[in-house]
C-alpha cells in the first residue's frame, strides 16, 4: 500500500460536491452559527445563503424549533455521540418533516 499524503480539497470543489447532493446538509460551528448550507437545504427551506450563513437557529426558526435544534446540538457536542432525531421545521408557512443525523466533527462542531 502506498502512503499518499492528504491534500485538502479546494473550497470550490467541496461546494460543488455538496450542492450536487439532493440531501439537505448544514455545518454549524461550536457556537451554533451556520457556516455552510448546501443548495438542497436552502431550496427546501425557501431561504437564501445570506438568510442562513452567519446566523443561529434563533434567527431562522420559531423559538420552539430553535430550542430543540440547539438542545440536540449541545448534547452532541457534550457527549461526542451522534444523534438521529425527527424534526418538523416550519419556516415561511412551509412545514417539512426531517430525519436528521447530527454528528460532532473533529473540530467540535455540529454537522
Image (tube, grey):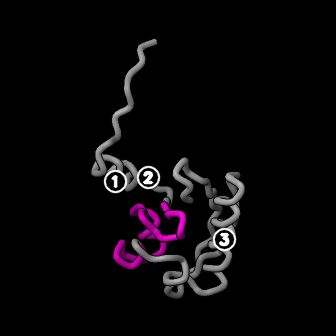
| Nearer to me, 15 or 34 | 34
Mark 3–mark 2 Cα distance, whole angstroms, equals 20 Å
Coordinates of residue 40 in the picture (x, y in percent): 44, 63
Coordinates of residue 61 in the picture (x, y in percent): 55, 82
Task: Count the labels in the image.
Answer: 3
- Look at discs 3 and 1 and give the one toward the viewer: 1
Residue to which mark 3 is pinned: 87
Mark 2: secondary structure: loop
Local crowd size for mark 1, using a 10 Å CA cut-off: few (<14), some (14–19), many (≥20): some
Sequence-first tag of 3 and 1: 1
Q: Is residue 21 left or right of residue 79?
A: left
Residue 33 vs 20, above or below: the answer is below
Residue to which mark 2 is pinned: 21
> Which part of the image, by quadrant, shows the C terminus?
bottom right
Residue to which mark 1 is pinned: 15
- Look at discs 1 and 2 and give the one toward the viewer: 1
Coordinates of residue 88 in the picture (x, y in percent): 65, 75
Residue 92 vs 27, above or below: the answer is below
Answer yes or no: do the residues labelled 3 and 1 have beta carbons within 8 Å? no
Whether residue 46 appears in magenta in the rendering, the answer is yes
Q: Residue at x 36, y 75 (%)?
A: 48
Mark 1–mark 2 Cα distance, whole angstroms, equals 10 Å
Mark 3: secondary structure: strand
Whether residue 43 appears in magenta in the rendering, the answer is yes
Q: Which region is colored magenta?
A: 27-52
Mark 1: secondary structure: helix
Answer yes or no: do the residues labelled 3 and 2 have beta carbons within 8 Å? no
Q: Residue at x 30, y 50 (%)?
A: 11
Residue 5 vs 80, above or below: the answer is above
Q: Residue at x 64, y 59 (%)?
A: 77
Local crowd size for mark 3, using a 10 Å CA cut-off: few (<14), some (14–19), many (≥20): some
Amino acid at each position: 500500500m502506498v502512503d499518499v499524503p492528504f491534500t485538502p480539497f479546494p473550497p470550490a470543489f467541496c461546494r460543488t460536491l455538496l450542492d450536487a447532493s439532493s440531501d439537505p446538509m448544514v455545518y454549524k460551528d461550536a457556537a451554533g452559527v451556520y457556516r455552510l448550507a448546501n443548495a438542497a437545504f436552502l431550496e427546501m427551506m425557501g431561504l437564501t445563503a445570506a438568510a442562513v450563513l452567519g446566523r443561529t437557529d434563533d434567527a431562522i426558526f420559531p423559538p420552539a424549533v430553535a430550542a430543540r435544534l440547539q438542545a440536540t446540538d449541545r448534547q452532541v457536542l457534550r457527549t461526542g455521540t451522534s444523534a438521529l432525531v425527527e424534526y418538523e421545521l416550519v419556516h415561511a408557512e412551509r412545514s417539512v418533516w426531517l430525519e436528521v443525523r447530527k454528528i460532532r466533527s473533529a473540530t467540535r462542531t455540529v454537522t
